[in-house]
Structures are given as C-alpha cells and as structure tokens.
Amino acid sequence: MTSSTSTATPMKHAFTRQVEEVKAPKSDINALILDYLTLAGYPNAAKKFSTEANLPPQQSHDSIEARQQIQTAIHRGDIAQAISDLNDLDPEILDADTALHFALLRLQLVELIRQCNATPGRDINPALEFATTQLGPRAPTNPQFLEDLEKTMALVVFSHDSLDPSLAALLQPDLRRQVADMVNKAILERETNRRETAIRHLVQMRAWSEETVRKDTKKDLPARIDLGLNGDDQNGFHENGQDTVMT
C-alpha cells in the first residue's frame, strides 16, 4: 500500500491576485528611489541614480552633502562642529526650533561628560561650565528641558559602570541617531517643506489603510499582507561604501 502527499499549490487570496495584477510605472518607482536617496542623504548615489534614470536632481549635490556632513559629525560625537555647520547652512533653524537646539546642546553635554570621565583625574569642570552657561538658562523655559538636564547631570554623579538603564541609554549611539534624525528633518522642512521620504509616507498610509479596512469595513483581507520588502539587502542603497546613511 502506498501513500501520496498532495503537492497542489495553495489558492491565492483574491486580494493578493489583485495586488499582483497592479503594475506600477517604472518612472514612478525611479522617482521614489531618487526621493529616498535625496532625503535620506546619499549625495553620490542620488547624483548617479538621477543620471542613470534620466531624472532631474531633486536637490543639488552640495545641499545633500551639507546635510550628510552635519549628520556625520553628530554620529561621531562632534556636536560643536555639527552646530557650527548647521548654522553655516541655515542660521535660522536653531533660532526657530528651541527644542532642536536644546537637544543638540544636551547631546553636546553628554559628549563632554563622556570625555571628562575618560580623562585622567576625571575633571568634570568643562561639563559643569557648559551645563551652567548653555543649558542652565534654557532649562527653566520648558519642564521637559529641565527634566532632561537633571537626568543628564546624573551622569556626573554616578559611575558609568553601574547606571540605571534610563541613564545608560544617554551614552548609547541611539541618542546620537535620534538627534541626527531630528536635525535632518528640520533641514528638510526648511528646504522642501517635507520631513519624510515619500516611500516612508506611502508605507504609513498603507498601514493606516489596512487597519481602517479591517476595522471599519470588515472586508475580506488576507490574514497577513507583506510589504514586499524582504529582499536580500534591506540596508538601503550603497555606492561602494562612499555614502553614509543619515537616518
């Protein structure tokens, strides 16, 4: 007696078949890619792609590179240089956005505290002077500023080897990334009246649409709808290692 196992291909959901029938124009896909490369801060890749796709640049190479330079300075902890470069690019950004200015100065204080702890004798005077002159006058204007400053100054008091998780997080690269993203969005808003790439906005709209349909209309949808972003390379676009991601 023999047995056999069915190898029939499962039937696709009607919605999935409809999605597969939709073919987006290549020109629209290319425009989304160029938009991402431009806003995310890949100047060399954006320049090369716009040429190959026969699309006009969305921003000048120098403008994208200037944003990238500021992000790179933040990621390496050189906040003073980042602030200087940001003021050179657009001196009104920090004047108009007090929360961003405070976030940058607070990160600069974190970096100073890190440096003080690394020096022989642990001279914390530079950090204390910076906190007093730069952050002290700003903190009372906003309860969140005051809370953030008090939390940061705790790094001066406690050993960095046994910090509470909420304090230890201030010394992790994530804080640099968060501030770098804030700066990038602020620059983009000034230059393009946008804070996010078009592809990110589309993904957000897609998620909202799916949730709305499931919740309000009770339409028959697949249990799970993939975004189709599970390719081999999920790390973005690279151009021989020359570009550094900014988000």
Image: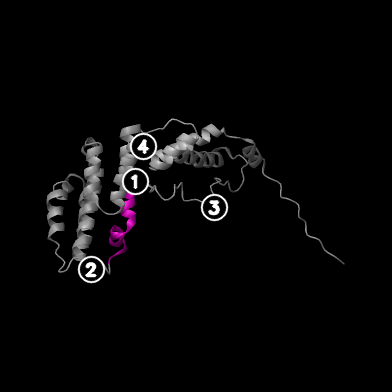
For label 3, count other residues whose C-alpha is less than 10 Å away and answer few (under 14), some (14-19) or many (20+): few
Structural distance between the alpha carbons of marks 3 and 1: 26 Å
Point 43% across, 30% down: residue: 56
Helix, strand or loop at disc 2?
A: loop
Q: Main secondary structure of the magenta part?
A: helix
Q: Amino acid at mark 4?
A: His
The answer to whether one can see residue 196 in this image is no
Query: Tag 4: Cα neighbours inside 10 Å, few (<14), some, or many (≥20)?
Result: some
Q: From mark 4 to mark 2, how far is it between C-alphas?
A: 45 Å
Kindly identify which numbered label has been placed on residue 232: 3
Which numbered disc covers residue 149? none
C-alpha span from label 1 to label 2 = 29 Å
> In terms of secondary structure, where does tag 1 sit?
helix
CA gap, disc 3 to disc 4?
A: 29 Å
> On the image, numbered disc 1 is attached to which residue?
181
From the viewer's perspective, is 111 left or right of 65?
left
Inspect the image, locate mark 2, and give the three-letter code of the amino acid beneath it: Ser
Across and down, in percent, residue 7 comes to 76, 55
Q: Is residue 166 magenta?
A: yes
At mark 4, the secondary structure is helix
Color encoding of the figure: one colour
Q: Which residues are magenta?
A: 163-178
Which sits earlier in the primary sequence, circle 2 or circle 3? 2
Reading the image, the residue beneath label 2 is: 159
Type of amino acid under label 3: Asp
Residue depth check, mark 2 versus mark 3: number of the one nearer the observer: 3
